[in-house]
Image (cartoon, rainbow, N blue to C red):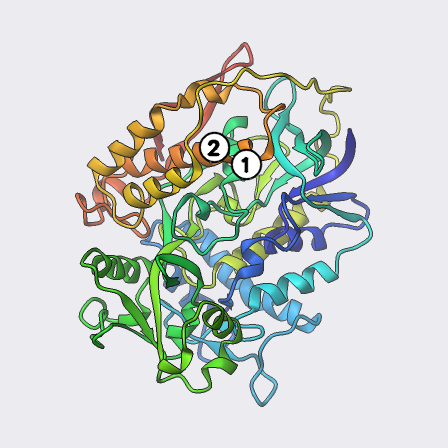
Amino acid sequence: MKQTDVIIIGSGIAALQLANKLTKTLNVIILTKMEWNTCNSYLAQGGIAAAIGINDDPYFHYLDTLEAGGHHNDAEAVLAMTKEAPELIKGIWHAGCRFDEDQDGRLQLGLEGAHSMKRIVHSGGDATGKHVVDFFSSNLGSNISIEQSVYVYELILNDQMDTCIGVKAKTPDGENEVYYADHVVLATGGCGQLYSFTSNAETATGDGMALAYRAGAELADMEFIQFHPTLLFVNGSTRGLISEAVRGDGAILVTGEGKRIMEDIHPLMDLAPRHIVSQTIYEYLKKGIQTYLDITEIEDFCDRFPTISQLCKENGVEIDKGLIPVVPGSHFIMGGVKTDLLGRTNIQGLYAIGEAACTGIHGANRLASNSLLEGMFIGSRLAEWINHNPAVYKNTKKSDAIKIEFYHPLAGLPEMEELKRTMMDRAGIVRTRAKLTAQKEWLDQFSFEEWMDVSLDQMSADEIKQFFMYITACLITESALERTESRGGHYRDDFPNEDNSNWMKKRIIRQRKKVKDGKHEYNQTPLAT
Protein backbone atom coordinates (compact mmCIF):
# COMPACT_ATOMS: atom_id res chain seq x y z
CA MET A 1 0.00 0.00 0.00
CA LYS A 2 1.26 3.47 -0.89
CA GLN A 3 0.01 6.87 0.27
CA THR A 4 0.48 10.20 -1.53
CA ASP A 5 -1.27 13.53 -2.01
CA VAL A 6 -1.97 13.38 -5.74
CA ILE A 7 -2.10 10.44 -8.16
CA ILE A 8 -1.95 11.26 -11.87
CA ILE A 9 -2.75 8.36 -14.22
CA GLY A 10 -1.03 9.13 -17.51
CA SER A 11 1.93 11.21 -18.65
CA GLY A 12 0.82 13.37 -21.60
CA ILE A 13 0.77 17.15 -21.89
CA ALA A 14 -2.19 17.62 -19.53
CA ALA A 15 -0.66 15.35 -16.87
CA LEU A 16 2.77 16.99 -17.01
CA GLN A 17 1.36 20.53 -17.02
CA LEU A 18 -0.62 19.64 -13.90
CA ALA A 19 2.37 18.04 -12.19
CA ASN A 20 4.62 21.01 -12.89
CA LYS A 21 2.07 23.53 -11.65
CA LEU A 22 1.33 21.75 -8.36
CA THR A 23 2.98 23.19 -5.28
CA LYS A 24 6.21 21.46 -4.28
CA THR A 25 4.71 20.72 -0.84
CA LEU A 26 2.47 18.08 -2.41
CA ASN A 27 3.76 14.57 -3.06
CA VAL A 28 2.76 13.38 -6.52
CA ILE A 29 2.90 9.94 -8.13
CA ILE A 30 2.50 9.63 -11.91
CA LEU A 31 1.40 6.13 -12.96
CA THR A 32 1.83 5.04 -16.59
CA LYS A 33 0.80 1.68 -18.02
CA MET A 34 3.80 1.62 -20.37
CA GLU A 35 6.87 3.85 -20.69
CA TRP A 36 6.20 7.46 -19.71
CA ASN A 37 6.56 8.76 -23.28
CA THR A 38 4.23 6.19 -24.89
CA CYS A 39 1.30 8.54 -25.30
CA ASN A 40 -0.56 10.52 -27.94
CA SER A 41 0.95 13.80 -26.75
CA TYR A 42 4.44 12.53 -27.55
CA LEU A 43 3.34 11.56 -31.08
CA ALA A 44 1.61 14.88 -31.82
CA GLN A 45 2.93 16.28 -35.10
CA GLY A 46 0.58 19.24 -35.20
CA GLY A 47 1.21 22.29 -33.09
CA ILE A 48 -0.59 24.38 -30.52
CA ALA A 49 -3.16 26.98 -31.54
CA ALA A 50 -3.01 30.49 -30.07
CA ALA A 51 -4.01 33.93 -31.34
CA ILE A 52 -0.52 35.41 -31.30
CA GLY A 53 -0.37 36.96 -34.78
CA ILE A 54 -0.57 40.73 -35.26
CA ASN A 55 -3.97 40.58 -36.98
CA ASP A 56 -5.32 37.71 -34.91
CA ASP A 57 -7.50 37.83 -31.82
CA PRO A 58 -8.68 35.21 -29.26
CA TYR A 59 -12.23 35.96 -30.39
CA PHE A 60 -11.41 34.80 -33.94
CA HIS A 61 -9.89 31.63 -32.48
CA TYR A 62 -13.09 31.23 -30.45
CA LEU A 63 -15.30 31.57 -33.55
CA ASP A 64 -13.24 29.01 -35.48
CA THR A 65 -13.49 26.57 -32.56
CA LEU A 66 -17.29 26.91 -32.44
CA GLU A 67 -17.64 26.50 -36.20
CA ALA A 68 -15.50 23.35 -36.24
CA GLY A 69 -17.36 22.01 -33.21
CA GLY A 70 -20.78 22.23 -34.84
CA HIS A 71 -21.75 24.83 -32.21
CA HIS A 72 -22.11 21.99 -29.73
CA ASN A 73 -19.32 23.58 -27.67
CA ASP A 74 -19.56 25.18 -24.25
CA ALA A 75 -19.06 28.71 -25.59
CA GLU A 76 -17.91 30.25 -22.29
CA ALA A 77 -15.31 27.52 -21.83
CA VAL A 78 -14.01 28.02 -25.37
CA LEU A 79 -13.60 31.75 -24.92
CA ALA A 80 -11.83 31.28 -21.59
CA MET A 81 -9.33 28.94 -23.27
CA THR A 82 -8.69 31.05 -26.37
CA LYS A 83 -8.13 34.14 -24.21
CA GLU A 84 -5.57 32.32 -22.08
CA ALA A 85 -3.85 30.55 -25.01
CA PRO A 86 -1.31 33.29 -25.93
CA GLU A 87 0.02 33.54 -22.37
CA LEU A 88 0.19 29.75 -22.00
CA ILE A 89 2.38 29.55 -25.12
CA LYS A 90 4.52 32.55 -24.31
CA GLY A 91 4.96 31.31 -20.74
CA ILE A 92 6.62 28.02 -21.68
CA TRP A 93 8.47 29.64 -24.63
CA HIS A 94 10.11 32.17 -22.33
CA ALA A 95 10.80 29.38 -19.84
CA GLY A 96 12.90 27.58 -22.44
CA CYS A 97 10.53 25.40 -24.45
CA ARG A 98 11.80 25.28 -28.01
CA PHE A 99 9.39 26.60 -30.65
CA ASP A 100 10.06 27.34 -34.31
CA GLU A 101 10.92 31.00 -34.93
CA ASP A 102 11.20 33.22 -37.99
CA GLN A 103 14.36 35.08 -38.99
CA ASP A 104 13.44 37.94 -36.64
CA GLY A 105 13.15 35.64 -33.62
CA ARG A 106 9.36 35.73 -33.47
CA LEU A 107 7.19 32.64 -33.20
CA GLN A 108 6.56 31.15 -36.62
CA LEU A 109 2.85 30.60 -37.17
CA GLY A 110 1.32 27.94 -39.42
CA LEU A 111 -2.13 27.35 -40.89
CA GLU A 112 -4.27 24.25 -40.38
CA GLY A 113 -7.74 23.10 -41.36
CA ALA A 114 -10.76 25.22 -40.32
CA HIS A 115 -8.55 28.03 -38.95
CA SER A 116 -9.27 31.46 -40.43
CA MET A 117 -5.63 32.56 -40.17
CA LYS A 118 -2.14 31.42 -39.29
CA ARG A 119 -1.96 30.74 -35.54
CA ILE A 120 -0.33 27.32 -35.09
CA VAL A 121 2.91 27.22 -33.13
CA HIS A 122 5.21 24.29 -33.93
CA SER A 123 8.39 22.85 -32.47
CA GLY A 124 10.86 21.01 -34.65
CA GLY A 125 8.51 21.27 -37.62
CA ASP A 126 6.36 18.18 -37.08
CA ALA A 127 7.69 17.10 -33.67
CA THR A 128 5.81 19.53 -31.43
CA GLY A 129 4.42 16.92 -29.03
CA LYS A 130 7.79 15.29 -28.44
CA HIS A 131 9.57 18.57 -27.75
CA VAL A 132 6.89 19.95 -25.42
CA VAL A 133 6.60 16.68 -23.47
CA ASP A 134 10.39 16.55 -23.16
CA PHE A 135 10.38 20.14 -21.87
CA PHE A 136 7.72 19.46 -19.25
CA SER A 137 9.28 16.17 -18.11
CA SER A 138 12.71 17.77 -17.71
CA ASN A 139 11.23 20.28 -15.25
CA LEU A 140 9.53 17.85 -12.87
CA GLY A 141 10.39 18.53 -9.24
CA SER A 142 11.74 16.14 -6.62
CA ASN A 143 8.25 15.86 -5.12
CA ILE A 144 7.11 13.98 -8.24
CA SER A 145 7.84 10.32 -8.93
CA ILE A 146 6.97 8.34 -12.05
CA GLU A 147 6.14 4.63 -11.85
CA GLN A 148 6.14 3.02 -15.29
CA SER A 149 4.41 -0.14 -16.53
CA VAL A 150 1.83 0.17 -13.74
CA TYR A 151 -1.67 -0.54 -15.06
CA VAL A 152 -4.46 1.08 -13.02
CA TYR A 153 -7.54 -1.14 -13.22
CA GLU A 154 -9.91 0.15 -10.52
CA LEU A 155 -10.84 3.37 -8.73
CA ILE A 156 -11.33 2.90 -4.98
CA LEU A 157 -14.35 4.69 -3.51
CA ASN A 158 -15.20 5.37 0.12
CA ASP A 159 -18.02 3.53 1.91
CA GLN A 160 -20.56 6.11 0.78
CA MET A 161 -19.37 5.68 -2.83
CA ASP A 162 -19.24 9.44 -3.38
CA THR A 163 -15.49 10.06 -3.05
CA CYS A 164 -12.51 8.53 -4.83
CA ILE A 165 -9.77 7.71 -2.32
CA GLY A 166 -7.28 5.75 -4.41
CA VAL A 167 -6.64 3.15 -7.10
CA LYS A 168 -5.76 -0.48 -7.58
CA ALA A 169 -3.03 -1.29 -10.11
CA LYS A 170 -1.04 -4.10 -11.65
CA THR A 171 2.70 -3.69 -11.13
CA PRO A 172 5.30 -4.78 -13.75
CA ASP A 173 5.63 -8.20 -12.08
CA GLY A 174 1.86 -8.78 -12.31
CA GLU A 175 1.19 -8.20 -8.62
CA ASN A 176 -1.60 -5.98 -7.27
CA GLU A 177 -0.79 -2.69 -5.55
CA VAL A 178 -3.04 -0.20 -3.78
CA TYR A 179 -2.39 3.55 -3.90
CA TYR A 180 -4.23 6.04 -1.71
CA ALA A 181 -4.44 9.77 -2.43
CA ASP A 182 -6.56 12.80 -1.66
CA HIS A 183 -6.76 13.64 -5.38
CA VAL A 184 -6.91 11.09 -8.22
CA VAL A 185 -6.54 12.44 -11.76
CA LEU A 186 -7.40 10.55 -14.95
CA ALA A 187 -5.09 11.72 -17.74
CA THR A 188 -5.17 8.44 -19.64
CA GLY A 189 -5.79 9.80 -23.15
CA GLY A 190 -8.29 8.67 -25.74
CA CYS A 191 -9.56 5.45 -27.29
CA GLY A 192 -8.32 5.42 -30.88
CA GLN A 193 -7.18 1.81 -30.62
CA LEU A 194 -10.84 0.74 -30.70
CA TYR A 195 -10.66 1.21 -34.47
CA SER A 196 -8.67 -0.74 -37.06
CA PHE A 197 -7.37 2.49 -38.64
CA THR A 198 -5.95 4.93 -36.09
CA SER A 199 -3.21 7.48 -35.53
CA ASN A 200 -3.18 6.81 -31.80
CA ALA A 201 -0.51 5.43 -29.51
CA GLU A 202 -0.75 1.81 -28.37
CA THR A 203 -1.91 3.02 -24.95
CA ALA A 204 -5.09 4.75 -26.22
CA THR A 205 -7.60 2.05 -25.31
CA GLY A 206 -10.20 4.06 -23.38
CA ASP A 207 -8.94 3.09 -19.92
CA GLY A 208 -9.86 6.31 -18.15
CA MET A 209 -13.39 6.29 -19.51
CA ALA A 210 -13.93 2.67 -18.51
CA LEU A 211 -12.47 3.28 -15.03
CA ALA A 212 -14.70 6.30 -14.51
CA TYR A 213 -17.83 4.57 -15.79
CA ARG A 214 -17.38 1.56 -13.47
CA ALA A 215 -16.96 3.98 -10.54
CA GLY A 216 -20.21 5.83 -11.33
CA ALA A 217 -18.83 8.95 -12.99
CA GLU A 218 -20.74 10.72 -15.75
CA LEU A 219 -19.52 10.44 -19.33
CA ALA A 220 -20.65 12.78 -22.10
CA ASP A 221 -20.60 13.02 -25.91
CA MET A 222 -19.14 9.56 -26.48
CA GLU A 223 -20.57 9.47 -30.01
CA PHE A 224 -18.29 12.26 -31.23
CA ILE A 225 -15.16 10.63 -32.68
CA GLN A 226 -12.83 12.61 -34.91
CA PHE A 227 -11.32 10.72 -37.82
CA HIS A 228 -8.12 12.33 -39.06
CA PRO A 229 -8.24 12.51 -42.85
CA THR A 230 -4.64 11.62 -43.58
CA LEU A 231 -2.97 8.55 -42.15
CA LEU A 232 -0.18 6.98 -44.19
CA PHE A 233 -1.63 3.90 -45.88
CA VAL A 234 0.70 1.16 -47.10
CA ASN A 235 -0.14 -2.46 -47.98
CA GLY A 236 -3.60 -2.27 -46.45
CA SER A 237 -2.51 -0.84 -43.07
CA THR A 238 -2.16 2.59 -41.51
CA ARG A 239 1.44 3.37 -40.60
CA GLY A 240 1.28 6.75 -38.89
CA LEU A 241 -0.08 10.28 -39.08
CA ILE A 242 0.48 12.78 -41.89
CA SER A 243 -0.01 16.09 -40.10
CA GLU A 244 -2.67 18.63 -41.04
CA ALA A 245 0.19 21.09 -41.38
CA VAL A 246 1.16 19.40 -44.65
CA ARG A 247 -2.11 20.60 -46.19
CA GLY A 248 -1.62 23.92 -44.42
CA ASP A 249 1.65 24.29 -46.34
CA GLY A 250 -0.01 23.62 -49.68
CA ALA A 251 -0.52 19.87 -50.17
CA ILE A 252 -3.74 18.87 -51.95
CA LEU A 253 -5.79 15.69 -51.92
CA VAL A 254 -5.97 13.96 -55.29
CA THR A 255 -6.81 10.65 -56.92
CA GLY A 256 -4.19 8.65 -58.77
CA GLU A 257 -5.28 10.45 -61.96
CA GLY A 258 -4.69 13.83 -60.33
CA LYS A 259 -8.31 14.84 -59.72
CA ARG A 260 -8.71 17.22 -56.75
CA ILE A 261 -11.29 15.59 -54.49
CA MET A 262 -12.14 18.60 -52.27
CA GLU A 263 -12.58 21.23 -54.97
CA ASP A 264 -16.39 21.24 -55.07
CA ILE A 265 -17.03 19.95 -51.54
CA HIS A 266 -16.29 22.90 -49.22
CA PRO A 267 -15.18 26.55 -49.58
CA LEU A 268 -11.96 25.75 -47.66
CA MET A 269 -11.32 22.78 -49.96
CA ASP A 270 -8.38 20.75 -48.59
CA LEU A 271 -8.44 22.71 -45.34
CA ALA A 272 -12.09 22.02 -44.61
CA PRO A 273 -12.98 20.68 -41.13
CA ARG A 274 -11.62 17.19 -40.54
CA HIS A 275 -14.94 15.35 -40.56
CA ILE A 276 -15.77 16.70 -44.00
CA VAL A 277 -12.39 15.77 -45.46
CA SER A 278 -12.53 12.32 -43.83
CA GLN A 279 -16.02 11.63 -45.16
CA THR A 280 -14.97 12.66 -48.67
CA ILE A 281 -11.93 10.35 -48.69
CA TYR A 282 -14.09 7.57 -47.28
CA GLU A 283 -16.56 7.93 -50.16
CA TYR A 284 -13.71 7.46 -52.64
CA LEU A 285 -12.45 4.44 -50.69
CA LYS A 286 -15.90 2.82 -50.96
CA LYS A 287 -15.56 3.15 -54.73
CA GLY A 288 -12.15 1.49 -54.61
CA ILE A 289 -10.29 4.72 -55.40
CA GLN A 290 -7.08 5.48 -53.47
CA THR A 291 -6.49 9.07 -52.36
CA TYR A 292 -3.08 10.75 -52.20
CA LEU A 293 -1.56 13.88 -50.72
CA ASP A 294 0.13 15.73 -53.56
CA ILE A 295 3.11 17.50 -51.93
CA THR A 296 4.84 18.72 -55.10
CA GLU A 297 4.15 22.39 -54.30
CA ILE A 298 5.85 22.26 -50.88
CA GLU A 299 9.46 23.43 -51.04
CA ASP A 300 12.08 21.57 -48.96
CA PHE A 301 9.48 19.07 -47.75
CA CYS A 302 12.03 16.86 -45.97
CA ASP A 303 13.40 19.82 -44.01
CA ARG A 304 9.94 21.13 -43.18
CA PHE A 305 8.57 17.72 -42.14
CA PRO A 306 11.47 15.50 -41.03
CA THR A 307 9.34 13.11 -38.96
CA ILE A 308 6.87 12.51 -41.79
CA SER A 309 9.67 12.13 -44.33
CA GLN A 310 11.34 9.48 -42.19
CA LEU A 311 7.99 7.71 -41.68
CA CYS A 312 7.46 7.56 -45.45
CA LYS A 313 11.01 6.33 -46.05
CA GLU A 314 10.64 3.56 -43.47
CA ASN A 315 7.48 2.37 -45.24
CA GLY A 316 8.81 2.47 -48.78
CA VAL A 317 7.00 5.62 -49.95
CA GLU A 318 9.21 7.68 -52.26
CA ILE A 319 8.83 11.33 -51.30
CA ASP A 320 10.47 12.45 -54.57
CA LYS A 321 7.43 11.21 -56.51
CA GLY A 322 5.28 13.75 -54.64
CA LEU A 323 2.35 11.46 -53.77
CA ILE A 324 1.66 10.06 -50.28
CA PRO A 325 -1.15 7.45 -50.04
CA VAL A 326 -3.58 8.28 -47.24
CA VAL A 327 -6.77 7.06 -45.56
CA PRO A 328 -8.78 8.48 -42.64
CA GLY A 329 -8.52 6.88 -39.22
CA SER A 330 -9.62 7.37 -35.61
CA HIS A 331 -7.72 10.30 -34.14
CA PHE A 332 -9.50 11.97 -31.20
CA ILE A 333 -12.61 11.59 -29.07
CA MET A 334 -14.41 14.81 -28.19
CA GLY A 335 -16.41 13.00 -25.50
CA GLY A 336 -15.15 11.44 -22.31
CA VAL A 337 -15.45 11.82 -18.55
CA LYS A 338 -17.69 14.83 -17.93
CA THR A 339 -15.90 17.59 -16.03
CA ASP A 340 -16.07 21.28 -15.27
CA LEU A 341 -13.34 23.73 -16.27
CA LEU A 342 -11.27 22.68 -13.27
CA GLY A 343 -11.28 19.04 -14.32
CA ARG A 344 -13.63 17.99 -11.50
CA THR A 345 -16.04 15.09 -12.06
CA ASN A 346 -19.30 14.31 -10.24
CA ILE A 347 -17.27 12.10 -7.84
CA GLN A 348 -15.36 13.97 -5.14
CA GLY A 349 -11.59 13.55 -5.33
CA LEU A 350 -11.74 12.30 -8.93
CA TYR A 351 -10.67 14.49 -11.83
CA ALA A 352 -10.15 14.04 -15.56
CA ILE A 353 -8.00 16.12 -17.92
CA GLY A 354 -6.78 15.88 -21.49
CA GLU A 355 -8.44 13.64 -24.05
CA ALA A 356 -9.95 11.39 -21.36
CA ALA A 357 -12.13 14.32 -20.26
CA CYS A 358 -15.10 16.07 -21.83
CA THR A 359 -15.05 19.75 -20.86
CA GLY A 360 -17.34 20.85 -23.69
CA ILE A 361 -14.55 22.88 -25.30
CA HIS A 362 -14.23 20.77 -28.44
CA GLY A 363 -17.94 20.40 -29.13
CA ALA A 364 -18.79 17.87 -31.83
CA ASN A 365 -15.45 18.13 -33.62
CA ARG A 366 -12.12 19.39 -32.27
CA LEU A 367 -10.47 22.24 -34.12
CA ALA A 368 -6.96 21.32 -35.26
CA SER A 369 -4.19 21.98 -32.69
CA ASN A 370 -6.62 22.68 -29.84
CA SER A 371 -5.88 19.39 -28.06
CA LEU A 372 -2.45 20.18 -26.60
CA LEU A 373 -3.76 23.64 -25.79
CA GLU A 374 -6.75 22.29 -23.86
CA GLY A 375 -4.48 19.92 -21.92
CA MET A 376 -2.27 22.81 -20.85
CA PHE A 377 -5.26 25.01 -20.07
CA ILE A 378 -7.20 22.55 -17.88
CA GLY A 379 -4.02 21.10 -16.34
CA SER A 380 -3.03 24.56 -15.16
CA ARG A 381 -6.49 25.32 -13.77
CA LEU A 382 -6.73 22.03 -11.88
CA ALA A 383 -3.30 22.59 -10.35
CA GLU A 384 -4.40 25.99 -9.07
CA TRP A 385 -7.53 24.48 -7.52
CA ILE A 386 -5.66 21.62 -5.81
CA ASN A 387 -2.99 24.03 -4.55
CA HIS A 388 -5.72 26.01 -2.79
CA ASN A 389 -7.58 22.89 -1.59
CA PRO A 390 -4.81 20.37 -0.82
CA ALA A 391 -6.54 18.62 2.08
CA VAL A 392 -10.20 18.98 1.13
CA TYR A 393 -10.81 15.19 1.32
CA LYS A 394 -8.35 14.24 4.08
CA ASN A 395 -11.12 13.26 6.48
CA THR A 396 -12.43 10.64 4.09
CA LYS A 397 -12.26 7.18 5.62
CA LYS A 398 -9.68 4.85 4.10
CA SER A 399 -9.58 1.14 4.81
CA ASP A 400 -6.34 -0.18 6.26
CA ALA A 401 -6.29 -2.90 3.61
CA ILE A 402 -8.18 -3.51 0.41
CA LYS A 403 -9.23 -7.11 -0.03
CA ILE A 404 -8.08 -8.70 -3.26
CA GLU A 405 -10.93 -10.81 -4.55
CA PHE A 406 -11.06 -13.83 -6.81
CA TYR A 407 -13.34 -13.70 -9.77
CA HIS A 408 -15.33 -16.33 -11.63
CA PRO A 409 -14.91 -15.77 -15.35
CA LEU A 410 -18.00 -15.08 -17.40
CA ALA A 411 -18.32 -15.85 -21.07
CA GLY A 412 -15.36 -14.50 -23.03
CA LEU A 413 -14.95 -10.93 -24.20
CA PRO A 414 -14.70 -9.96 -27.88
CA GLU A 415 -11.30 -10.49 -29.47
CA MET A 416 -9.58 -7.13 -29.90
CA GLU A 417 -8.98 -7.41 -33.65
CA GLU A 418 -12.61 -8.28 -34.27
CA LEU A 419 -13.72 -5.45 -32.00
CA LYS A 420 -11.57 -2.97 -33.93
CA ARG A 421 -12.81 -4.20 -37.30
CA THR A 422 -16.49 -4.09 -36.37
CA MET A 423 -16.18 -0.66 -34.75
CA MET A 424 -14.53 0.69 -37.91
CA ASP A 425 -17.16 -0.90 -40.16
CA ARG A 426 -20.28 -0.14 -38.11
CA ALA A 427 -19.48 2.76 -35.74
CA GLY A 428 -16.79 4.52 -37.77
CA ILE A 429 -16.75 7.44 -40.17
CA VAL A 430 -20.20 6.87 -41.72
CA ARG A 431 -22.91 5.38 -39.49
CA THR A 432 -26.46 4.12 -39.99
CA ARG A 433 -29.14 2.77 -37.68
CA ALA A 434 -28.78 -0.68 -39.23
CA LYS A 435 -25.00 -0.80 -38.72
CA LEU A 436 -25.12 0.60 -35.20
CA THR A 437 -27.93 -1.76 -34.20
CA ALA A 438 -25.94 -4.69 -35.54
CA GLN A 439 -22.91 -3.55 -33.53
CA LYS A 440 -24.94 -3.10 -30.35
CA GLU A 441 -26.47 -6.56 -30.70
CA TRP A 442 -23.04 -8.05 -31.29
CA LEU A 443 -21.62 -6.30 -28.22
CA ASP A 444 -24.64 -7.22 -26.07
CA GLN A 445 -23.97 -10.93 -26.46
CA PHE A 446 -20.91 -10.55 -24.20
CA SER A 447 -23.09 -9.66 -21.16
CA PHE A 448 -22.16 -6.04 -20.53
CA GLU A 449 -24.17 -5.67 -17.31
CA GLU A 450 -22.86 -8.86 -15.74
CA TRP A 451 -19.25 -7.90 -16.45
CA MET A 452 -19.65 -4.62 -14.56
CA ASP A 453 -19.67 -6.34 -11.15
CA VAL A 454 -16.88 -8.84 -11.82
CA SER A 455 -13.71 -8.40 -9.76
CA LEU A 456 -10.69 -7.61 -11.91
CA ASP A 457 -8.11 -8.41 -9.21
CA GLN A 458 -7.03 -11.72 -10.69
CA MET A 459 -7.22 -10.70 -14.34
CA SER A 460 -4.06 -10.01 -16.31
CA ALA A 461 -3.25 -6.58 -17.72
CA ASP A 462 -4.07 -7.80 -21.24
CA GLU A 463 -7.46 -9.12 -20.12
CA ILE A 464 -8.22 -5.82 -18.39
CA LYS A 465 -7.30 -3.86 -21.53
CA GLN A 466 -9.64 -6.08 -23.52
CA PHE A 467 -12.41 -5.42 -20.97
CA PHE A 468 -11.88 -1.65 -20.96
CA MET A 469 -11.98 -1.54 -24.76
CA TYR A 470 -15.25 -3.46 -24.64
CA ILE A 471 -16.81 -1.01 -22.15
CA THR A 472 -15.77 2.02 -24.20
CA ALA A 473 -16.98 0.46 -27.45
CA CYS A 474 -20.40 -0.14 -25.88
CA LEU A 475 -20.66 3.47 -24.68
CA ILE A 476 -19.71 4.87 -28.10
CA THR A 477 -22.07 2.58 -30.01
CA GLU A 478 -25.09 3.25 -27.78
CA SER A 479 -24.57 7.02 -27.89
CA ALA A 480 -24.12 7.01 -31.66
CA LEU A 481 -27.36 5.06 -32.03
CA GLU A 482 -29.17 7.53 -29.77
CA ARG A 483 -28.14 10.72 -31.62
CA THR A 484 -30.41 10.89 -34.67
CA GLU A 485 -28.60 13.64 -36.55
CA SER A 486 -25.21 14.34 -38.10
CA ARG A 487 -22.99 16.82 -36.30
CA GLY A 488 -19.22 17.20 -36.27
CA GLY A 489 -17.46 13.87 -35.94
CA HIS A 490 -20.75 11.97 -35.75
CA TYR A 491 -22.10 11.32 -39.25
CA ARG A 492 -25.34 9.37 -39.73
CA ASP A 493 -26.03 8.50 -43.38
CA ASP A 494 -29.71 7.98 -42.46
CA PHE A 495 -29.84 11.39 -40.69
CA PRO A 496 -27.36 13.38 -42.81
CA ASN A 497 -28.16 16.88 -41.50
CA GLU A 498 -27.83 18.77 -38.24
CA ASP A 499 -31.13 18.76 -36.33
CA ASN A 500 -30.94 21.97 -34.32
CA SER A 501 -34.55 21.85 -33.18
CA ASN A 502 -34.08 18.54 -31.36
CA TRP A 503 -30.32 18.23 -30.74
CA MET A 504 -28.64 21.64 -30.56
CA LYS A 505 -26.54 21.76 -27.34
CA LYS A 506 -28.03 18.48 -26.08
CA ARG A 507 -25.43 16.16 -24.55
CA ILE A 508 -25.95 12.43 -24.11
CA ILE A 509 -24.83 11.49 -20.59
CA ARG A 510 -24.05 7.90 -19.71
CA GLN A 511 -23.68 6.94 -16.06
CA ARG A 512 -23.70 3.84 -13.94
CA LYS A 513 -25.98 4.62 -11.01
CA LYS A 514 -25.41 3.49 -7.43
CA VAL A 515 -28.14 2.06 -5.19
CA LYS A 516 -28.52 1.73 -1.44
CA ASP A 517 -26.80 -1.61 -0.93
CA GLY A 518 -23.63 -0.43 -2.62
CA LYS A 519 -24.33 -2.39 -5.78
CA HIS A 520 -24.92 -0.68 -9.10
CA GLU A 521 -27.78 -0.40 -11.50
CA TYR A 522 -27.50 0.77 -15.10
CA ASN A 523 -28.90 3.86 -16.65
CA GLN A 524 -30.32 2.23 -19.78
CA THR A 525 -31.71 5.47 -21.21
CA PRO A 526 -29.09 8.16 -21.84
CA LEU A 527 -29.77 11.56 -20.39
CA ALA A 528 -29.90 14.28 -23.02
CA THR A 529 -29.05 17.56 -21.32
Q: On the image, numbered disc 1 is attached to which residue? A: 345
* Vertical position of residue 41 compared to residue 184: above or below: below
Quarter of the picture containing the C terminus is top left
In the picture, measured across the screen, residue 40 lies left or right of residue 74, that is: right
Q: Earlier in the sequence, mark 1 or mark 2?
A: 2
Measured from the top left, where is residue 407 in percent x and y?
57, 17
> Mark number for residue 209?
none
* Vertical position of residue 252 compared to residue 341: above or below: below
In the picture, measured across the screen, residue 518 lies left or right of residue 184, that is: left
* Vertical position of residue 3 compared to residue 97: above or below: above
When asked about the image quadrant of residue 208, the answer is top right
Residue beneath the point at 52% across and 42% down? 340
Q: On the image, numbered disc 2 is attached to which residue? A: 218
Marks 1 and 2 in Cβ contact (< 8 Å): yes
User: What amino acid does circle 2 point to?
Assistant: Glu
- Of 529 and 40, which appears nearest the observer? 40
Measured from the top left, where is residue 32 in percent x and y?
65, 45
Residue beneath the point at 41% across and 77% down? 318
Question: Is residue 268 in view from this perspective?
Answer: no
Of helix, strand and loop, which one carries label 1? loop
When asked about the image quadrant of residue 116, the answer is bottom left
Mark 2 packing: few (<14 Cα in 10 Å), some, or many (20+)?
many
**Mark 1 → mark 2, Cα distance in angstroms:** 7 Å
